[in-house]
Image: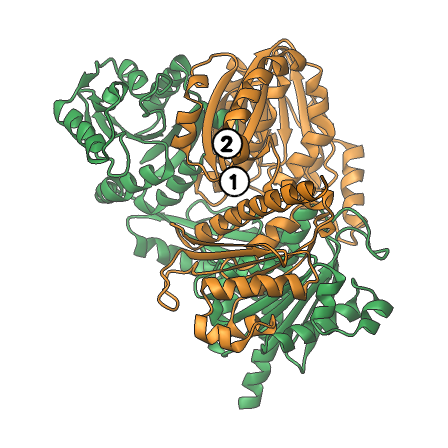
Chain colours: A green, B orange
Amino acid sequence: MKAEIISVGTELLLGETIDTNSNFLANEFPTLGIDLLWTTQVGDNFNRLEEIIRTAIQRSDIIFMTGGLGPTEDDITRETLALALNETMIIDKDQEKKLRNFFASRDRQFPEKNIKQASIIKSAKFLDNPVGTAPGWWIKKNNFQIILMPGPPSEMKTMWFGQIKERLLNKSQDVLVKKIIKTSTLGESNINEMIESFLHGENPSVGIYVKKDGVSIRIAAKAKNQDIAYKMIKPIEMQIKDILDTYIWGEDDQKFAQVIQKVMNQHDLTLGIIESASGGNLANEITNIENSSSFFKGSLVAYQKDAKLFSGISQEILESEGTVSLKTTSELAKQAKQIFKADIGLAITGVAGIDTIENKESGTIFLSITNGEKVINKKLLLPGNRTQIKNRAVFLSFTLIKEFLDTIVIDANHDST
Amino acid sequence: MKAEIISVGTELLLGETIDTNSNFLANEFPTLGIDLLWTTQVGDNFNRLEEIIRTAIQRSDIIFMTGGLGPTEDDITRETLALALNETMIIDKDQEKKLRNFFASRDRQFPEKNIKQASIIKSAKFLDNPVGTAPGWWIKKNNFQIILMPGPPSEMKTMWFGQIKERLLNKSQDVLVKKIIKTSTLGESNINEMIESFLHGENPSVGIYVKKDGVSIRIAAKAKNQDIAYKMIKPIEMQIKDILDTYIWGEDDQKFAQVIQKVMNQHDLTLGIIESASGGNLANEITNIENSSSFFKGSLVAYQKDAKLFSGISQEILESEGTVSLKTTSELAKQAKQIFKADIGLAITGVAGIDTIENKESGTIFLSITNGEKVINKKLLLPGNRTQIKNRAVFLSFTLIKEFLDTIVIDANHDST
């Protein structure tokens, strides 16, 4: 089913709000067999909105519209739709009652301009809005459908899950199923060369893209149902996983921290961190994961010398080796293990800012990880601005933790044999 | 100047990446006198991309395109543009040298795939990419221009600030100037009531919108040049600032941490933090600010009991009061001041996860701040999921630091009189 999204609101074109609705819907569509082919953001402008609606009903089977359903003068999505479809809007009495009750139940006086939120056209049915005043419309006409939803993401999502997704599920013909393979260490073009032979298929198709969490490979297959699609994906998935092997850290919507949490929990390991250059970014990423306290003990964001000394590292080392150095970092990793009573200690020092520190240029990052026996140290030079360097340092820390866990787990297996 | 954005990438339509580039550019355009009228996301599909390009050159004076400039098979933006403009691509020898040097300088072998990133068409000039391998194009043809930029936000922004924005500045006619006033504590509807009388103007116009960093008020004026526009904005700005007064924490693109850094530096104050529920999120936000070490000493992310004990808090208090309580939090604030040798200590405890801790429900947050003399404690109950609660806790921590600084700075002024 060919689909497109039209997001209405001048605030989108002024960059004041980012169109997260489209991103949310785009994520929902594939398993419903809905092919999203276009997304358009347009302002609260009668002519341009009408023009896009007319284009959309020519090229798409189903059109999802969000925004412009408010009570104010510049909310014109309903009016424009009515005109583009050559229909007239009328006030629906039941809907008007609902509206007035909504305000009454909140001891608020009904603003008469909200009356327009009770209007509808002949080809449309209302979609209830349990968390707001603007109902949606589901239009069925000729060979197309238009689903109209409010702009506020919470209202849009409530409507989507409550009244729309279920009904589209039944309609769905061919579904698109995706398998995402997430990698670290290798660059986009390296991976392109390694899996080149898979990149020319139509169905399943294989694509490569880069995100904050590394290079991802997407295998997508279209079929009558999910099982068939998965069967089509499987052989290619296996071969690509075989090629990329240890460069793979996760798949689908997994977060790097989740993958590490899983291994840590399996082997009953805990982690303590001392981070300076990353400034709490690593701890923050880890604690975004539900139940992270199952392995994460804590992090000392040692942003200044006093804080580093508080970790128990000897003043001598700090002064002889400097606060940003491999030796200091590996000492801090030991302290991290100790002060947090953790099985594994990790430390990050470096220069995220623009100014050089102790003759180390911006982007210099030192990483060290230890379990008391094994130690791995890394020195890196990362490009980018402050936040980019911080984010990259966090990603490479996860990569290092994975590498470290792989080695000690393998050892553990050896010991047990 | 009528403008539109075309963002290219199937990952956008599959919801795998969100189009932050369009949002960034939309923010940049107004002061350049560029009217953004459409934004379109389209996949790496030859026919649909060509169709949109053909539509765009009919309706827009300037078209900004991002994405699809990578070295891989499915990066087809250049090829499609060449076709849509009836031009042929050729490999530029100088650009090829640059490319090969880029890899050589990083001791990486040149993947022959990347050669296509050296190609260009007659109507285009190259835009250098100092942080990546894909150069941009600036096309001038007939009555339109097309500016082609790489998809990765860091590369796109570097190109924008380095080679594009400046040159567009000279072209600008009528400019739109915005003044943003950022507030905390009050809700959207409160503010709506307080400044109602300003909300109906056309030019300047006043709007209210909610973001992660509180409720923002936008005053926008269109005029021949920036000075005139600012003169139109000023009187309204003054009146609104007068009404919202102490609820205002910053303006325009300021970050809350920057505002706090400024005050901290003025009064030569330093900050130490112990955070559990926010899990390093507060430290991370602070260290995203350039030169944050000028006032930020560090944070102990005390995610487990061991870590809290390491801060020096007495075991008795932890056991009698619990790890999530007002008393414990205010004790941790004192410890934060002490262990980081800071002037001000701040502590955050609470429940960000879904499970209740010590009979405290999800969303419970305790905040405490002290300079050794004064103490402010807060108990909050925040809605939302894990990351929403963490983000809200950080925002309210900044609000608390501001409130605390206001009081002690006022006292300081009193003393000095």
In the picture as drawn, the residue positioned furthest to the top comes out as B224
Residue placed under numbered mark 2 in the picture: B216
Above or below — where is A373 with respect to B91?
A: below
Q: Neighbour class for label 1 at 10 Å: few (<14), some, many (≥20)?
A: some
Residue B225, percent from left and from top: 66, 12
Give the chain letter at badge 2.
B
Above or below — where is B281 with respect to B42?
A: below
Q: What element carries label 1?
A: loop
Determine the image quadrant of residue B133. Answer: top right
Residue B26 visible in the shown view: no
Q: In which quarter of the image is the C terminus of chain A?
A: bottom right
Residue A39, percent from left and from top: 43, 31
The number of callouts visible is 2
Q: What residue type is labelled 1?
A: Asp
Q: Tell me: A106 left or right of A182.
A: left
Residue placed under numbered mark 1 in the picture: B213
Q: What residue type is labelled 2?
A: Ser
**Residue at 21%, 44% in the rendered image:** A170
**Residue at 55%, 62% in the rendered image:** A248
Q: What element carries label 2?
A: strand
Same chain for labels 1 and 2? Say yes or no: yes
Residue A376, percent from left and from top: 70, 72
**Residue at 32%, 31% in the rendered image:** A150
Instruction: In this rendered view, identify the residue nearer to me: B277 or A221.
Output: B277
CB under 8 Å between callouts 1 and 2?
yes
**Dot label at residue A338:** none
